């Protein structure tokens, strides 16, 4: 038996095995990156004591969300202006327009903390931070609020939550 020939055969098989491992790793890497994407739901809500204006596409918020609001805030009616669900890579931010007057930029900073910049009429209104774990794992709502400049006594709420927050609630019932 020729030992040189045997060692070349073993080396070629090892090389083939290593190439196969690298190809599998290379092919599955995009899926690993996608798994690290962050999925969130954002809702822009209007709080008021008045009825919804006729002709506007506003619907009342879910009973679960309304129950959380009425126990804390003074308004009787809460209308959903927009509801968007999306994913974005944790290492990159996400800019989203929620209404003609409201836009947000979300990004992950320092150890899984969500930073949200809220723009009203293209002006930075505020920057707020919240840990991600309570939103994604515990089902907490992250709420940012402000006065409605167009309607005295009313308010707007930006609600950031797990994308399946309403579905999870239905399953628990």
Image (cartoon, rainbow, N blue to C red):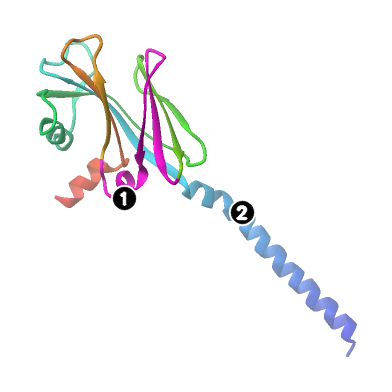
Q: Is residue 123 magenta?
A: yes
Q: Residue furthest bottom?
A: 1
The stretch of residues the image draws in magenta is 111-140
Who is closer to the viewer here, 95 or 115?
Answer: 115
**Residue 16, numbered label:** none
> Vertical placement of 84 versus 169: above or below?
above
Spatial CA span between label 2 and label 1: 29 Å
| Horizontal side of residue 49 vs 145, given as left or right | left
Dot 2: what SS?
Answer: helix
Name the spot of residue 136 as percent of width and height, x first: 33, 46
| Residue appearing at x 37%, y 12% in the figure | 121
Q: Circle 2 is placed at which residue position?
A: 27
Which one is closest to the eye, mark 2 or mark 1?
Answer: 1
**Where 49 sits versus 133, above or below?**
above
The vertical placement of 33 against 10, above or below, is: above
**Tag 1 residue:** 137
């Amino acid at each position: 038996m020729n030992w040189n020939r045997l060692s070349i055969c073993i080396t070629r098989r090892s090389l083939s095995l290593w190439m196969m491992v690298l190809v599998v790793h290379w092919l599955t890497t995009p899926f690993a990156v996608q798994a690290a994407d962050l999925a969130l739901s954002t809702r822009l809500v209007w709080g008021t004591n008045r009825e919804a204006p006729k002709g506007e596409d506003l619907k009342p918020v879910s009973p679960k969300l309304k129950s959380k609001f009425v126990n804390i805030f003074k308004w009787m009616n809460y209308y959903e202006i927009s509801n968007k669900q999306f994913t974005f890579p944790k290492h990159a931010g996400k800019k989203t327009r929620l209404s003609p007057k409201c836009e947000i930029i979300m990004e992950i900073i320092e150890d899984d903390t969500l930073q949200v910049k809220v723009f009203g009429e293209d002006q930075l209104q505020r920057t707020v931070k919240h840990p991600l774990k309570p939103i994604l794992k515990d089902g907490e709502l992250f709420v940012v609020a402000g006065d409605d400049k167009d309607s005295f006594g009313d308010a707007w709420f930006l609600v950031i939550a797990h994308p399946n927050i309403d579905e999870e609630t239905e399953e628990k019932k």
